[in-house]
């Protein structure tokens, strides 16, 4: 599907293969194109909703296939009371409209609701959000089915905007391409998407974008460096660990890079501390943080962003094999700190701590890690919000503000000394878990903070947001939108 922009004067109401998305307000007035089409149809749209057919609820839709003097179909969207909605209601309208469009049989969709006046938002924001949300809704993962389901017949999504918003469309298209990469990697089963597969995909990314350089560290390389914490996780698997390092140089060579670190556990059984079998298939999603780093690199390269980026993905499979690490084992991390491994299912922090130490070699301006780290994040925030922790209040505040702006809800958690004091071991510098089940998400952040003291750092626990369960099971692509908006805010 192609996403384009056109001005309102370009809409052809005589095209039988097109559908116009127009808005109606609670007072039964229409958005401008809706007004024009209502008049052209001899007020047929108005007559329809006068018969109490106005869809109830913000974002509710009414599909109208045929009207007098109109050859196009119409999707009528309830835009509520306010003709100037706030950003959250605008995003709600977009998401519900996207759901309606997946059921409509048409080749061209003309979307007019970018003409709504959204409080405190400019046209670029409105057009970007519309293109990104509507365009990404049509993602399907069916490449492993013998018979693929028929996808939406929509070939062109036309967003009403002027030429000044071409950049917004360009950014949205790049995001959609990045989201597809992230979701495809995450949705693949672990018998295909293992650490070696991720390493191969990293090399392909470099082949597609010459501005992205890729280096792969093998287990022998990691052993020489002293990444014993990371290697303790891969001990039980026949799949060798891979440490993927992306380097994108789009800015001035003198500028320090932003380093993104993504947890890449391609499957997590829990190791010797094995998980319960229920929903264990979803542990293929334990590499969503790593997949997001892939997406960041692709989007930055496609948009030619004037920034310098490093992407680090420790890719490991956590299995209970004969060489698997045991609870009680002690390993020496790349930082030199020793770690008592009390639970092998707290493995994400064991690979991340070595990756975060490795990040120091790049003299980073900022380091942001993303990880499906703790079930506690899901218990606290559900599928709604990312948990943000870190050692730099401004960085966390910036991420929080941008998350609210782009609709990817996030919230911060503290790393107070009282929590830090819970990480004590009788036999090593620190344990990988603390003694009870309380404050798990915060304690995991405290653990990582012990390896990030030499730079500005933020940690996103995306265990509740990176995928959804149930009948619509699948990767969400979060937090790629948030990371792109963060980068764009800096350039």
Image (cartoon, rainbow, N blue to C red):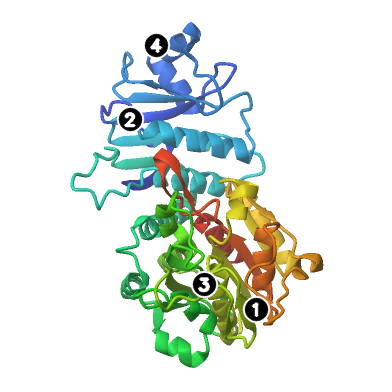
Left-right relation of 478 to 103: right
Name which residue lies at 46% across and 56% down: 171
Left-right relation of 367 to 209: right
Task: Tell me the residue that label 3 is attached to.
Answer: 306
Name which residue lies at 26% across and 27% down: 16
Tell me if residue 345 comes above or below residue 175 in the rendering. Answer: below
Residue 211 seen anywhere in this rendered image of the structure: yes
For the residues marked 3 and 1, what is the alpha-carbon distance in whole angstroms?
29 Å
Of all residues, the one furthest to the left in this rendering is: 146
Which label lies toward us, 3 or 4?
3
Residue 436 pos. (x, y %): 69, 60
Which label lies toward us, 3 or 1?
1
Which label lies toward us, 2 or 3?
2
For the residues marked 1 and 2, what is the alpha-carbon distance in whole angstroms?
51 Å
Residue 477 pos. (x, y %): 46, 54
For the residues marked 4 and 2, what is the alpha-carbon distance in whole angstroms?
24 Å
Residue 245 pos. (x, y %): 45, 79
The picture quadrant where one finds residue 431 is bottom right
Task: Tell me the residue that label 4 is attached to.
Answer: 42
Of the image marks 4 and 2, the number of the one nearer the N terminus: 4
Task: Tell me the residue that label 2 is attached to.
Answer: 104
Tell me if residue 131 comes above or below residue 337 in the rendering. Answer: above
Residue 451's mark? 1
For the residues marked 1 and 4, what is the alpha-carbon distance in whole angstroms?
69 Å
For the residues marked 3 and 4, what is the alpha-carbon distance in whole angstroms?
52 Å
Of the image marks 2 and 3, the number of the one nearer the N terminus: 2
Which label lies toward us, 1 or 4?
1
Assign a secondary structure to mark 3: loop
Assign a secondary structure to mark 2: loop
């Amino acid at each position: 599907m192609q996403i384009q922009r056109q001005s309102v004067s370009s809409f052809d109401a005589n095209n039988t293969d097109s559908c116009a998305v127009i808005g109606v307000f609670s007072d039964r007035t229409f958005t401008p194109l809706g007004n024009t089409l209502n008049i052209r149809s001899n007020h047929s749209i108005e007559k329809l909703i006068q018969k109490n057919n106005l869809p109830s609820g913000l974002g509710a839709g009414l599909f109208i296939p045929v009207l007098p003097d109109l050859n196009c179909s119409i999707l009528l969207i309830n835009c509520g009371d306010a003709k100037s909605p706030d950003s959250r209601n605008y995003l709600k309208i977009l998401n519900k409209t996207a759901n309606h469009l997946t059921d409509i049989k048409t080749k061209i969709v003309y979307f007019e609701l970018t003409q709504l006046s959204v409080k405190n938002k400019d046209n670029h924001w409105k057009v970007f959000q519309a293109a990104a949300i509507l365009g990404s809704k049509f993602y399907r993962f069916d490449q492993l089915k013998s018979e693929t389901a028929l996808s939406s017949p929509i070939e062109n999504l036309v967003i009403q905007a002027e030429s000044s918003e071409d950049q917004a469309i360009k950014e949205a298209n790049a995001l959609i391409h990045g989201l597809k990469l992230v979701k495809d990697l995450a949705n693949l089963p672990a018998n295909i998407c293992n650490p070696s597969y991720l390493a191969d995909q990293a090399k392909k990314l470099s082949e597609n974008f010459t501005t992205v350089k890729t280096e792969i560290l093998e287990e022998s390389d990691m052993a020489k460096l002293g990444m014993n914490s990371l290697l303790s996780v891969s001990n039980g698997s026949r799949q060798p660990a891979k440490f993927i390092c992306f380097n994108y140089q789009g800015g001035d060579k003198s500028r320090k890079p932003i380093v993104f670190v993504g947890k890449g556990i391609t499957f997590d059984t829990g190791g010797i501390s094995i998980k319960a079998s229920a929903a264990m298939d979803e542990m293929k999603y334990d590499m969503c943080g790593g997949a997001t780093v892939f997406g960041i690199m692709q989007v930055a390269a496609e948009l030619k962003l004037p920034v310098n980026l490093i992407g680090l993905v420790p890719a490991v499979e956590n299995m209970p094999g004969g060489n698997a690490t045991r609870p009680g084992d002690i390993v020496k991390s790349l930082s030199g700190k020793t770690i008592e491994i009390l639970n092998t299912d707290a493995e994400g922090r064991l690979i991340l701590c070595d990756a975060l130490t490795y990040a120091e070699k790049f003299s980073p301006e900022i380091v942001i890690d993303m990880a499906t780290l703790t079930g506690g994040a899901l218990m606290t925030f559900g599928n709604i919000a990312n948990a943000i922790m870190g050692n730099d209040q401004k960085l966390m505040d910036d991420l929080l503000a941008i998350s609210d702006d782009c609709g990817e809800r996030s919230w911060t958690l503290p790393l107070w000394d009282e929590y830090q004091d819970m990480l004590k071991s009788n036999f090593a510098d620190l344990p990988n878990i603390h003694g009870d089940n309380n404050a798990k998400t915060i304690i995991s952040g405290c653990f990582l903070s012990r390896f990030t003291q030499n730079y500005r750092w933020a940690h996103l626990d995306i265990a509740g947001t990176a995928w959804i369960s149930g009948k619509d099971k699948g990767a969400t692509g979060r937090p790629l939108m948030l990371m792109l908006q963060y980068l764009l805010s800096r350039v």
